[in-house]
Amino acid sequence: MPDFTDNLKPLYDGVQTLVDERARSKINVEELAKHLLSRDDFYERQKRVTKILEGEPLFSKKQNLNLSRPDRYHVGLARAKALRRLTLKHGWDDLDFRMAEYLVDEVSPYHLHNSMFQQTIREQASDEQKAKLMPLVDNYEIIGCYAQTELGHGSNVRGVEALAKWDPKTKEFIIHSPTLTASKWWNGSMGRTANYAIVVAQLLLPKASSPTTYVNHGPHPFIVQIRDMKTHQPFDGIVVGDIGPKYGYTSMDNGYMLFDNYRVPHSAMLARYNRVDPDTGVLTKSGHPAVVYGTLTYVRANIIMHSRLILARACTIAIRYGAVRRQFKDRDAPNPAAVPELAVLDYPTVMIRLLPLLATTFALHYTGEAMYNIYWGTRKSIESGDFSKLAELHSASSGLKSLCTSFAADGIEVCRRSMGGHGFGGYSGILPLNNDYLSKPTVEGDNWMITQQVASYLIKKMETVVKNPNAASKDSTDDLFKHYLKSRSSKVPVDIVRFGQVDDQAIVEAFRWRAAHLSYLAYEARIVNKGKWNNLMIQLHKLSNAYSQTFLISHFYDAVMKSPLSSPTNTVMHDLYRLFALNTIDSDSHSFAATNAVTSASLDRIPDVVLHLMTDKIRPHAIKLVDSWSMPDYLLESSLGRYDGRVYEDMYDRVHRHNPLNKITFNPDWRNEEIVMGSGSGTQQVLAKL
Amino acid sequence: MPDFTDNLKPLYDGVQTLVDERARSKINVEELAKHLLSRDDFYERQKRVTKILEGEPLFSKKQNLNLSRPDRYHVGLARAKALRRLTLKHGWDDLDFRMAEYLVDEVSPYHLHNSMFQQTIREQASDEQKAKLMPLVDNYEIIGCYAQTELGHGSNVRGVEALAKWDPKTKEFIIHSPTLTASKWWNGSMGRTANYAIVVAQLLLPKASSPTTYVNHGPHPFIVQIRDMKTHQPFDGIVVGDIGPKYGYTSMDNGYMLFDNYRVPHSAMLARYNRVDPDTGVLTKSGHPAVVYGTLTYVRANIIMHSRLILARACTIAIRYGAVRRQFKDRDAPNPAAVPELAVLDYPTVMIRLLPLLATTFALHYTGEAMYNIYWGTRKSIESGDFSKLAELHSASSGLKSLCTSFAADGIEVCRRSMGGHGFGGYSGILPLNNDYLSKPTVEGDNWMITQQVASYLIKKMETVVKNPNAASKDSTDDLFKHYLKSRSSKVPVDIVRFGQVDDQAIVEAFRWRAAHLSYLAYEARIVNKGKWNNLMIQLHKLSNAYSQTFLISHFYDAVMKSPLSSPTNTVMHDLYRLFALNTIDSDSHSFAATNAVTSASLDRIPDVVLHLMTDKIRPHAIKLVDSWSMPDYLLESSLGRYDGRVYEDMYDRVHRHNPLNKITFNPDWRNEEIVMGSGSGTQQVLAKL
């Protein structure tokens, strides 16, 4: 319905603002975009898939936040089915399909079927099992999930309580949940969707010498049909359901499941590497492939590359809106009445929150790229029988998972708060980003826990180098530690900033030195002084972060040194490296002083250099830098972060024309028990949901 | 329906765990609880009101997270009406009513009526206006809201665009929104509920000398009826509605509103202090009362006291669950097979996140108490004509608002991540806490913005003291700055930790010294070197935080020194002071070194002392310390944080017996377009909501 607000304009024109912002930077956006998004043809693929999704009304995100959680699952399943149809219709390959999932920005109830279920069968089923299962999996004849985590045990996989006991008489496994905490829990796609599950349970086999005594052979995977194909009801002896609303993942049916002495045939145990002889009940193992470590590196490289896009998305929204939004005038302006209010992004208190995060997106990019390259290199080494670099790789990837997902998760909230009130609005595009990403520091290895693996590796390494200082180096960490041991008695702190000049190479050395020094202190505490592991945990966590930072810094530095980008983009990228490095040092400066890595004088100079980098070097390019991340408006679903700067017009349109609550009239009088006066559900209907 | 899971128990008994935890601490919980919650009889009042609410099915929170946003408003309004009825039924006074709102833990659609609407009329309406309006307000005959913030202007109130132009012919004000960004926005209770609004608009009056020229007299409040009392439809010339879903505040109808030359009578302008003569069109002002500053202090004291309860709530949940949850065995245990897994709270990596936050709750408490005492003292001074302490107070309260709401908002997320996966579950009790609190660092003065007021005050103060070093001190800041100026040339850093002993008094001095030093640097940069304000903003923000920390530290120290608590509670409180202080120093240690406040040697020793304090001194009392905050299970609505430790049983009950999604059966086959097989809304109905 037309009304007097139809032709109103905002006080400041956001469209013109962004046009002006883009005009004043000479960065070649397309060049930088292709530089960042070339792997797997991401840049072109995104364009192609976005176009298709934008044309499908079912994939409109406009009402997502107005739906109840049960409806979100319902719609999520409808979308999952539609994605399957689009895949067939457009002949999408796996990368196209993943791109669509990413753009739809909602975890699909089919997600575990497409990922862990399929992958586990491919990697751990015997050829015979695969021949039977894979056609059903590929054609979605069955829908699967992966049931490992339990109510009582997440991080500690060896602690799972579900049991799979071999019955030699019937040649069946008896799957059983002995306690309440043995309930499978959190497992995606299991609550309402899946009819099959990979169930991880402790394998119990009778002792050969005493058949009534059972021996625990540790967690193993079993494939189990959990629901009837016709009625979709669970079988007797299985209780399964959805675990209800949670922070994010609204469309996903994370589930719970318990078994009451539920019998499955011998063929249920996935038998590629481990097999129970049905006649003797004896387990034979054909050793795990070393490639598992390589795969982990690949998964972690994916996590880093994903964190880069998450952070870039938050930065895109916050930086574009920061350029459009104006608030207060410069109090030092000669004639304040004559000037417009300042763009929020021009305040150093906003820049100091957003621009280092923008620099971080590039740091994450180059480290993610490096991890992929290392993965492919390692695969080759492994194929030629050389496993020497696996341990370093595994350790590096654990520490980086922890550090990079923390950067992204914390960064989202920093971006949000930088936007003032509208950062909290449903039209900000930040809500689903926040809700769905904030589990990442916890899942796939808790960020505080997995850093122990890094520290453990470094302590062992240092111990070896101390014992054999003249042995040949196996990797770059060996080199670093040898250098450290030789130089530590004569080490003096280094100037990284002097006469306003930044020494880029010295920065890399400072990070490496600090990591080596902290490794030595940890070695001393644990090996020399026999300190208790648990008492060292906080120190070890800091060590891991310091070590992981060296990767980010040195990969960024290397990339900047050999940048293929044209001018001025290469210069801006160099400044971003400096901003990232100096800001990281500043946020933990005592540690750089205490390890003799950097002079106090340099540390004191950092804030001024950072301010100069931000204000003069990076701010003018901020909009084009986020443009280069090429976030489609469809993905952002954000009034504040729109490419065209129509911030307020779009907010108003969403609120004034598409908010379903505005179609219902309520009676505010407390003496009137009936609430609804106009359309909408009646009060009794709504209250019945309580 | 009974099933085989009915009698399952968790692997570890959470109930017994908490019984044991409570048995090993000698803290007198009731004594400490009354010490913390005596003001306004909070402790007894909470018990009384909780009992009533627990008996009302409408106030059950169990299904809150399963309701759509429109339904959440609907239920929220029903609850608001029910609270009104309960108030009358039980003869609740205002504090009882506020307690009920706090416990229901959902912002009521009547909230703005009860707060800003009522308060503004009471403070700014003329006696005549009050006589007419207050009976209607008190009896809820009209429902009001407060419309100040606009789409384009939040922080900058002077920048609001809505106009109120005096028409001398008709003797009316013409309220008008000249642009889209002039739309009122975010205003609570306005979207669907209110029929009256206080509208803040720029008062335009004709110039006496040239009646066609209008002069802007700045923002003024007008009372405007916005909806018809019978149909509840907005009047012609007004567009008003709800701004849709947002982060938190789900039950609240934050609104938007625009005016098209909408005429209101002369009586609409609230006229206690400012009045337009209807015959001459001349504005007369009878100066604002100085009490406004005092009221601000009171509001800020409330914010600090509230932040203490918010943080205590997050800590209660995380610490109780951390004691119940077990994960991994101690790798240094002599016989790992024989010991149970460790309670998560026993890991230093968990303690370092939770116990400093627990200490912070007490720091916030004592500063909140001090602010109340200062408020009442200031009121007395003002009444006797002494305004000398107002400026210091105002500055202190701005800085503390910023610091304390950041502590609480950030602390919630730290607590959540400490809980692993279940911290993300709907049964954690953390979701509404997070969603509803995270706006606090932004609203009522953005935390990065208001720190400028503090810095501005300190710079002026330092300038005065530098100019007149021998003038009599007006307040404690003067004393500090004088001491600083006298001693700075001879200052040497101080040991705060030595031979394992903590020097409590020296800690207070270190914080004060640092604040003075940073004040001096800011004075130098701005006044001596004429630095641009905007370029100094980051430095000024840090200054404000450092200055505000001195309040938290010294009030905590004073409280510990004169503690009325019995042993061992007083000792534990002393240890909490040390933990809070040392952890705060550790997180910004370079600043304490760079300002010559603390020796490097002391800074290096802090991590060991902190570990010792946590492990040996505070951990044994952690459960009883959170018990003392007396959070009712009804408020927490958390399986993880239950008082009795029945964590897993309660999670299972909620999920297995009360999740509405589990009552619907879906067909997972993608070739089948029809989604629902069992009960529930049909697919077409659900998709129609998109």
Image (spheres, coloured by chain):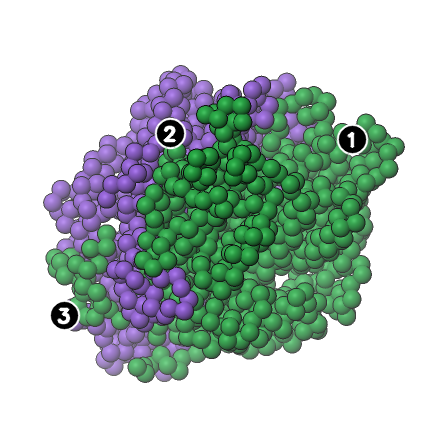
Chain colours: A green, B purple
Secondary structure, mark 1, is helix
Q: Residue at x 75, y 48 (%)?
A: A382
Q: Which residue is mark 1?
A: A464
Residue A476's spot in the image, x, y percent?
A: 79, 43
Task: Find the distance from the CA under tag 1 to the CA under tag 3.
Answer: 84 Å
Secondary structure, mark 2, is helix
Secondary structure, mark 3, is loop
Q: Is residue B264 above or below residue A129?
A: below
Q: Residues within 10 Å of mark 1 (few under 14, many from 20)?
A: some
Task: Find the distance from the CA under tag 1 to the CA under tag 2.
Answer: 44 Å
Q: Is residue A411 above or below residue B232?
A: above
Residue type at mark 1: give it: Thr
Which mark identifies residue B14? 2
Which mark identifies residue A272? none
Badge nearest the viewer, 3 or 2? 2
Most foreground residue, B647 or A448: B647
Q: Are marks 3 and 2 on the same chain?
A: yes
- The N terminus of chain B sits in image quarter: top left
Residue type at mark 3: give it: Lys
Q: Is residue A487 visible?
A: no
Which mark identifies residue B230? 3
Most foreground residue, B226 or A366: A366
Q: Residue at x 78, y 63 (%)?
A: A563
Most foreground residue, A480 or B432: A480
Occupied quadrant, residue A91: bottom right
Residue A611's spot in the image, x, y percent?
A: 67, 55
